[in-house]
């Protein structure tokens, strides 16, 4: 029997839902559960060009396994209006993905943000996109994983601050 998840959903979005968004989702859940179980948020992920049911990349699986996180059962899914309606916050990895989401789902534009910019709470950052590591080798993946972990920690910090003012 699966546990019923309540709270606000953060949807991480990338292209194929096999690398960046899955890593972000898994890191968010792990850090939240380990350090801030009271935080009333949970993570999900999807892709704007995902092949339904695809497995995560072997590099993504490896990077997260090193941190004690198992994503082998994850199956890629496409972004759709139902997912966006259920999400309080939609965080995409690139500006191109933001443009796609806002164009295809204009009613959701007020909750769609660029992940790094939103996490750091800065309007403009020099390196604000999370580059797709697909096909770039394990060291590139490990760098992306490291950046995502830093960004997730910043994101959780901001979410916790917002809770204090609710």
Image (cartoon, grey):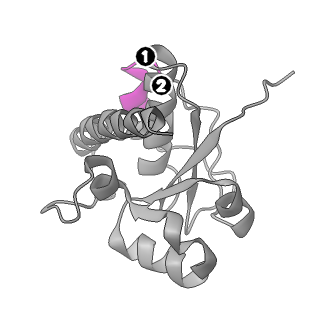
Nearer to us in this view, 6 or 21: 6
Q: Which residues are magenta?
A: 62-69
Q: Residue at x 47, y 44 (%)?
A: 57
* Residue reaching furthest to the right: 1
Residue that badge 2 annotates: 32
Q: Is residue 130 visible?
A: no
SS under mark 1: helix
Coordinates of residue 136 in the picture (x, y in percent): 27, 52
> Which numbered dot is residue 59?
none
Nearer to me, 121 or 116: 121
Left or right of 132, for residue 89: right
Residue at left 39%, top 34%? Answer: 156
Q: Quadrant of residue 114?
A: bottom left
- Residue plotted at (53% across, 27% down): 39
79, above or below 54, in the image: below
Is residue 40 visible in the rendered image? The answer is yes
* Residue marked by disc 1: 35
Please state, as top left, top right, bottom left or bottom right, where the N terminus lies in the image: top right
Query: Is 71 situated left or right of 83 in this image?
Result: left
Whether 77 is among the magenta residues is no
In this view of the protein, which residue sits in the foreground, 148 or 116?
A: 116
Tell me if label 2 and label 1 are in contact, CB under 8 Å: yes
SS under mark 2: helix
**Most distant residue in the front direction:** 165
Instruction: List x then y, in percent, for residue 18.
Output: 51, 49
Q: CA distance from mark 2 to mark 1?
A: 5 Å
User: In the image, 71: left or right of 4?
Assistant: left
């Amino acid at each position: 029997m699966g546990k019923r998840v309540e709270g606000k959903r953060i949807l991480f979005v990338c292209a194929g839902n096999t690398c960046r968004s899955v890593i972000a989702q898994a890191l968010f859940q792990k850090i939240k559960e380990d350090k801030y179980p009271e935080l009333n948020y949970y993570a999900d992920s999807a892709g704007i060009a995902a092949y339904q049911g695809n497995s995560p990349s072997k590099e993504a699986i490896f990077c997260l396994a090193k941190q004690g996180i198992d994503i082998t059962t994850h199956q890629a899914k496409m972004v759709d209006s139902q997912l966006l309606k259920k999400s309080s916050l939609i965080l995409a990895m690139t500006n191109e993905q933001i443009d796609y989401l806002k164009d295809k789902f204009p009613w959701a534009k007020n909750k769609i943000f660029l992940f790094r910019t939103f996490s750091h709470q800065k309007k403009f950052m020099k390196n604000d996109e999370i580059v797709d590591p697909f096909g770039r080798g394990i060291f590139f993946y490990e760098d992306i994983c490291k950046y995502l972990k830093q960004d997730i920690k910043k994101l959780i910090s901001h979410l916790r601050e917002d809770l204090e003012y609710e």
